[in-house]
Image (cartoon, rainbow, N blue to C red):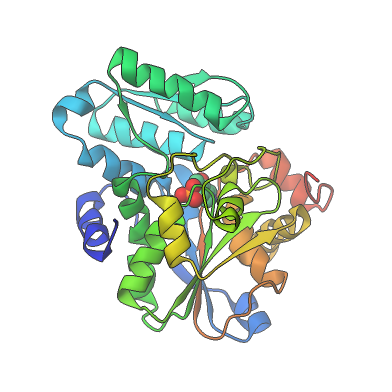
């Protein structure tokens, strides 16, 4: 489906369009867990999240003709922002469909990148129906947020960078929503270092992939408000790739409470000096909550930093501990 050579090819294709982000040792987390812990800081990626890797690879996978008809996608924010950025960088037009749950700062960020934004409905599924209409009626090209071989291979380049920087890595913690990130990272890590464990991490409130893996088939869950808003949304009942890849490649899936996620954000701000959104903080949160115990060199994918500054301030001040 998506294997190491696909990911290596993606790395060559997107080189020069994305940043090879820092992999930094955390003194505090290493001390607390008794194993070397490294943070893969995708909040330093252009657009503030790893999504640019998959989006750029997916756009570069399209031929000129498909690209010229324009790009369309639905997104909880970061994927839309990434597609808008990739479209502008590669000279294409982009339309981004979002549900009304997407925070205002993310909507503005996409508009400022030159893409057209359409707010449709109350869920990711409603936004997706509008994308399907743009594809069927207006001939635009869909850039999927996660369930696509080119997107997965692009996200997997993070795994290659981790394996290069930490050759004896034994555990990788990856935020998990639709599973494009986790599938790609796990395929890269298992391809390079089969004995390493890869653990997916989601929030307790509305984790569609976790529920689907437990059910043994893709299922729908209710979309709920959460500090990890970038982890919201379904995996698609007709999921083609990421459900099977996550089922086959992830060693474990861990769920976190809103208070635990808030503690991860707070730790990143006050101890590591990094402004991180909820989805980006779940790996740190899992470690802080003792829900995962590293037995050796550990890499945490810090997937993004796009958080409303007012929300971030409240969390760091300890006023708002969570949505629950
Ligand atoms: C999209 C996103 C994720 C989850 O990625 P999936 O491929 O959907 O699992 C995690 N963190 C951030 C910041 C994201 O934007």
**Residue found at x 40% / y 84%:** 168
Give the quadrant of the N terminus: bottom left
Instruction: Name the quadrant containing residue 28.
Output: bottom right
Would you say 317 lies left or right of 144 here?
right
**Residue found at x 28% / y 41%:** 58
Pick the residue in front: 210 or 63.
210
Residue closest to the far left: 64
Would you say 144 lies left or right of 323 here?
left
Above or below: residue 193 compared with residue 315 = below
Instruction: Name the quadrant containing residue 114.
Output: top left
Residue closest to the far right: 319
Above or below: residue 151 compared with residue 214 = above
The image position of residue 259, as x and y in percent, is 78, 56
Residue closest to the far front: 216
Does residue 304 appear anywhere in the picture? no
Instruction: Name the quadrant containing residue 183.
Output: bottom left
The image position of residue 240, as x and y in percent, is 38, 45
The image position of residue 311, as x and y in percent, is 72, 42
Pick the residue in front: 210 or 98.
210
Would you say 237 lies left or right of 53 here?
right
Would you say 160 lies left or right of 309 here?
left
Above or below: residue 153 compared with residue 141 = below
The image position of residue 23, as x and y in percent, is 44, 69
**Residue found at x 26% / y 26%:** 92
Residue closest to the far top: 137
Above or below: residue 12 compared with residue 234 = below
**Residue found at x 70% / y 59%:** 256
């Amino acid at each position: 489906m998506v294997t190491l050579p696909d990911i290596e090819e993606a790395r060559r294709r997107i080189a020069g369009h994305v940043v090879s982000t820092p992999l930094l040792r955390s003194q505090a987390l290493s001390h607390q867990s008794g194993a070397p812990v490294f943070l893969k800081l995708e909040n330093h990626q252009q657009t503030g999240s790893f999504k640019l890797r998959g989006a750029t690879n997916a756009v570069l996978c399209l031929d000129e003709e498909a690209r010229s008809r324009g790009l369309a996608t639905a997104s909880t924010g970061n994927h839309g922002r990434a597609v808008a950025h990739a479209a502008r960088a590669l000279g294409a037009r982009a339309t981004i469909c979002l549900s009304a749950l997407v925070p205002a700062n993310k909507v503005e960020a996409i508009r400022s990148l030159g893409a057209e934004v359409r707010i449709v409905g109350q869920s990711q599924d409603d936004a997706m129906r509008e994308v399907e209409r743009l594809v069927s009626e207006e001939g635009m090209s869909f850039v999927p947020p996660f369930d696509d071989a080119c997107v997965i291979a692009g996200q997997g380049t993070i795994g290659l960078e981790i394996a290069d920087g930490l050759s004896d890595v034994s555990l990788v913690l990856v935020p998990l929503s639709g599973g494009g990130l986790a599938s790609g990272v796990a395929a890269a890590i298992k391809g390079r270092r089969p004995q390493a464990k890869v653990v997916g991490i989601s929030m307790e409130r509305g984790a569609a992939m976790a529920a689907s893996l437990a059910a043994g088939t893709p299922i729908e869950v209710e979309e709920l408000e959460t500090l990890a808003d970038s982890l919201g949304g379904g995996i698609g009942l007709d999921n083609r790739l990421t459900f099977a890849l996550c089922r086959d490649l992830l060693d474990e899936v861990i769920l976190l409470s809103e208070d635990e996620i808030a503690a991860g954000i707070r730790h990143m701000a006050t101890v590591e000096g990094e402004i991180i959104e909820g989805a980006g903080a779940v790996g740190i949160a899992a470690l802080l909550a003792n829900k995962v115990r590293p037995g050796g060199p550990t890499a945490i994918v810090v997937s993004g930093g796009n958080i409303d500054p007012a929300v971030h301030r409240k969390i760091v001040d300890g006023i708002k501990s969570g949505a629950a």
